[in-house]
Image (tube, grey):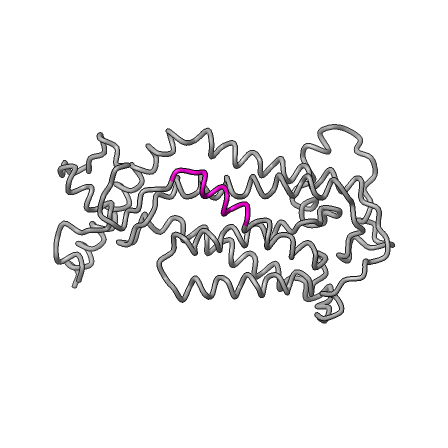
Amino acid sequence: MTVYIAREASKLWRKVCVETSVELQLLAEKWKLLFAGLMFQYIHGLAARGVHYLHRPGPTLQDLGYMILPELGRERGYISESLFTFVFLSFVLWTFHPFVYHSKRFYTVLLWRRILAFLVASQLLRIITFYSTQLPGPNYHCREGSKLARLPPPESITEVLLINFPHGVIYGCGDLIFSSHMIFTLVFVLTYHKYGSKRLVKLLAWVIAIIQSLLIVASRKHYTVDVVVAWYTVNLVVFFIDKKLPEMPDRSTGSQPMLPLNVKEKDGKPRGETLKLLNGNSVDTADWV
């Protein structure tokens, strides 16, 4: 048993090392696009902070979702955030599974390049939308009488650039149409639907996306229109951008066109053996036990 565990641990470590070597070389080639996508996340946060200075609280607008769904209340507002956190963390972990598991359909670096392209396009449209018209925030801290509903004029540019993280992100107002939570949720679900391999998980992901939509409205963090617009906008954005981007190589077929020529295992095994290891095709029939 000890020998078996040691052999399996050695193979796992070898897979992680080879996968890391390939991903780092891809990162060295694609880092500018990834960095630009990550920087836009900050710009998106900066824009959301900026619209808070323009926010003017007022009566909550008439909303069909508010009429249908009972209000969760301030004390249960954490439910929607907890579900979103679960979706976010589980998806991020899944994108790194090629480092460990036999089943490999994509490269993590190339996958996140696509994800960030989807997010940036959707967030750019979101910024344009919520700056076009500022609605009175329905969230509890954005309503009339709340000290957080209005922001005093900034005293310096530094105050704006720092966006008062994380307090300014959690208690923002005015960035309503359309929901940022639904942008992330739908991009993640659509990505897994295309590149994931578990049919049951795909179905569950769509169910969770629907539940997330209902919880956002029930917790009064967004109007129903914010969620509805997110559903068709994000789906259209992903559809059109996905058509424009070059398709990633499917690693499950056994071919490996993206394998760098200088990738070689530390123990000196030939490139063909390394290729099998990267694809999840073991070089030893005992590996499939």
Q: Is residue 75 magenta?
A: no
In the figure, is residue 60 to the left or right of 210? right
Q: Quadrant of residue 150?
A: top right
**Residue 129 vs residue 92, the one in the foreground:** 129
- Depicted 289 relative to depicted 20: above or below: below
Where does the magenta region start and end? 236-246
Residue at image position (57%, 64%) is: 210
Quick one: 224 or 19, which is closer to the camera? 224
Q: In x, y percent, where is residue 35?
A: 49, 32
Q: Position of residue 80 (x, y in %)?
A: 62, 61
267 left or right of 68 in image: left
Q: Is residue 237 magenta?
A: yes
Which quadrant of the figure contains the C terminus? bottom left
Q: Is residue 79 left or right of residue 221?
A: left
Q: Seen in the image, is 74 located left or right of residue 85? A: right
Q: Is residue 7 or residue 101 the one in the foreground?
A: 101
Residue shown at 73%/37% (left/top)?
Answer: 50
